[in-house]
Structure formats: C-alpha cells, structure tokens
Image: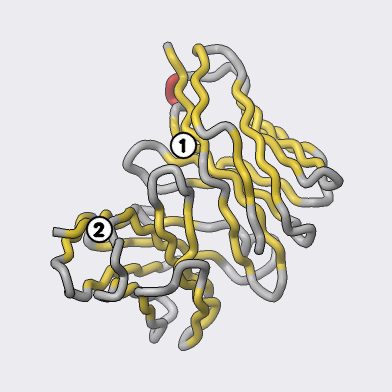
Amino acid sequence: DGGITQSPKYLFRKEGQNVTLSCEQNLNHDAMYWYRQDPGQGLRLIYYSQIVNDFQKGDIAEGYSVSREKKESFPLTVTSAQKNPTAFYLCASSAKNRGSGEKLFFGSGTQLSVL
Amino acid sequence: GENVEQHPSTLSVQEGDSAVIKCTYSDSASNYFPWYKQELGKRPQLIIDIRSNVGEKKDQRIAVTLNKTAKHFSLHITETQPEDSAVYFCAAIANTGGFKTIFGAGTRLFVKA
C-alpha cells in the first residue's frame, strides 16, 4: 500500500462522540498531513506536522485534534465539536528535503459517516 | 490567502481526443506544481510535476505547461483512453520554511469509449 496505512476504511460516529483515525507510515518521512475531501471541494488541509512533537493547524482545524508522538504515526481525532464530520479523510506524508519533499504520498483514506 | 482555481470541474471527451485542464494560482512565491490523479475509490497519486524554472514538461501522453507571468499552469492529456477517467487535482506549493500544498477543487474527467 505504498508505505502509508490508514485505518479503519469506514468509520461511523454517533452524535457527541469523539473518534480517532489512524495513520502510520514506514517511509521514514518527516512530514505528515491530514486532508479532508468533500465532493466538489478538493482537498482541504486540517493539520500538518513537520517533525515529531510538533504540528500546525491547517485551513480547517476547528473540531479536530492531532498528536505526533512518533515519527511513524499521526492520528487524527474528530471531536464532537466538529458538527459536519461526514467526509473522506486522507493522510499523507512527505520527505523533508528540498527536491522531493513537496511530493505527497497518500494513504487509502477513511470514510467517516455520522449515524 | 493562497488559492488555486481549477477548470473545468467536469470534462467529457471521446476516446482518442485530447483533454486540457487549467489552473491558476495566487501566491507568487509558489515554485512547484504537481498534478495528482485519483481513480474512483482510490488514493490520489502524483502523475507529473513541474518546477518554476521550467516552462513545459512531458511524460508520454501527459504534459504540463507553466506560465509564471500569468500564474497559469495546465495539464494536457493526448490520445485519451478509458483508464484516464478519474479526478485530477492541480496543486501549488511555496517553499516557505515548509511545504504546504494548496489544491485545486479537482476536475472529473470522463473518457468515453
């Protein structure tokens, strides 16, 4: 699967519930990203991390939280504060060095739906 | 803020015809422009990219052109095949201490056999 694995493939959330999406990579990439994909709106950046124990908000961070305790892992929590969480969530990673660091490698995605 | 506009949102062509997708970016510091292809139910994958010091790049049936002055870049697919049917995303990146990719909204390409 190209070295970056997302799980689960499908996830259902009940109202008021927090859910966590997993993203693991074995590409030794420094940077990791979370994108949200809605029909007709392309890919919007939620959070990104360029190094362990550090992360920055993207364009639509409200209602989401992340952690980066290990280089390989960048889990995303969709909190109850996110009122419209139904979407396809894509995790990506990239190397840090110029010349290849701009290229994103994507996971296979998680489809989150609200019950 | 930074923005990438992509047109058209949907494109339908006959097999063997050419397809052109156009993008415009707003951040003049952008210096890297990748194109990703996402087949139905699959992850986006990089198909071609171009840097700001190059005006055109070609890889078999696909090519990308860049006009830095106008802040336009385009994807050209020649001799389209049914397996080219997918959603295509353009993107722009500025190296401002990190790599933040700004994506266009995507173009859904249908190639009719």
Q: Amino acid at mark 1?
A: Val
Q: Amino acid at mark 2?
A: Leu
Residue appearing at x 61%, y 18% in the figure: B18
Question: Label 2: how many residues lie within 10 Å, few (<14), some (14-19) or many (20+)?
Answer: many
Residue B69 located left or right of residue A44: right
Residue appearing at x 48%, y 49% in the figure: A42
Image quarter in which the N terminus of chain B is found: bottom right
The mark found on residue A81 in the picture is: none
Q: CA distance from mark 2 to mark 1?
A: 20 Å
Give the residue number, with chain letter if any, for mark 2.
A112
Place residue B67 in its image quadrant: top right
Q: Position of residue A73 (x, y in %)?
A: 37, 75
**Residues beneath discs 2 and 1 located on the same chain:** no
Q: Position of residue A10 (x, y in %)?
A: 20, 55
Q: Is residue B49 above or below residue A3?
A: above
Q: Secondary structure at mark 2?
A: strand
Place residue A98 in its image quadrant: bottom right
